[in-house]
Amino acid sequence: MIFELRQVTALDVAGAELLARLFADIEARGTPIALVGVAEPHVAQLVAADPSGRVAARIAATEIDVLRLLNPGRVTRPIERLIAGVRRFQQSAGRRRLLVERLAKAQDPHTLFVSCADSRVVPTLLTSTDPGELLQVRNLGNIVPPSGGAAMPAEGAAVEYALTRLHITEIVVCGHSGCGAMTALLARDPAVGMPSVAEWLRPAAALLARLPDDATPGDAAMANVVLQLEHLRTYPIVRERLVAGQLRLHGWYYDIGAGALSAWDDVAEQFVPLVSPIRSSASAHRC
């Protein structure tokens, strides 16, 4: 049994205790449960209402968590998870028929979004965008090799296609905290067993000269975003569109733990919050 709590906007102590008793009663009857969409403040209340820890153990953060909780003892293979997702996508497609029909005819994205291939970085989730809005380029370290290299990079092809054929007006390069590519780069020996990775990171190696000896992967990731913006400006089509006022470049940094995004400010020469922090209702009430 799945309890969907995304629409629960308020939960007092009595309500949390009632839910905890309900969950315990259902499980006592042999029915496994999973709680999804639990807001952070409500997690603490539910945990406090059930010192045994049963409720906390039933809170699911991902679809895989749900499958594990509802099928204890059964190992779900990754491909099964994907197929289940495809099935749910097809079942929900009817609710977005108008968008699906429009996308079947053509695409009209407004932004080229260059991000890391890290599984924790999901551009459409971060920006709450629909299919068809972002043309995405994802690779290790959100790198855009400079124009004029010996090999024609896929990233350069995407830039040219985005600006020439799709008339995109915004390009975002988004780095993130905990980036494995930046950690490897700082180690200065990323090639152990990964020669392709070493070759791929070569265009980003220039940022090492910009970093202090005690730089963290986060420092490197932010410096790398700025470097990739410079690389973008080496493409003739990018320079042309910038001069014409038909294109804007943006550098973002995603702090995964905080769930916060910051943007590079050319004038201040630093990253600043992309949006103002969201205040809790309690804080807003006090103000």
Image (cartoon, rainbow, N blue to C red):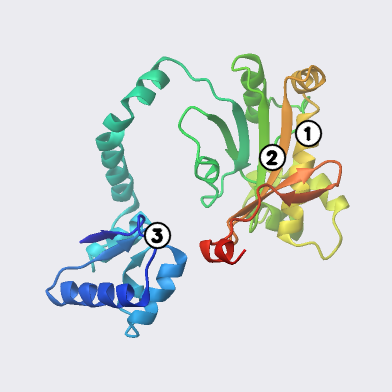
Q: Classify mark 1: helix, strand or loop.
A: helix
111 relative to 273, above or below: above
* Residue at the (68%, 26%) spot, across then down: 156
Name the amino acid type tagged 2. Ile
* Quarter of the view holding residue 225: top right
Considering only order in the chain, which callout, 1 or 2, is on the residue closer to the N terminus?
A: 2
* Quarter of the view holding residue 143: top right
* Residue at the (59%, 17%) spot, across then down: 166
- The answer to whether the residues at label 2 and label 1 have Cβ atoms under 8 Å apart is yes
In the image as oriented, which residue stretches furthest toward the bottom?
51
| Tag 2 residue | 143
- The answer to whether the residues at label 3 and label 1 have Cβ atoms under 8 Å apart is no
Q: Which mark is residue 186?
A: none
| Tag 1 residue | 231
Image depth: mark 3 or mark 1 in front: 3
Q: Classify mark 2: helix, strand or loop.
A: loop
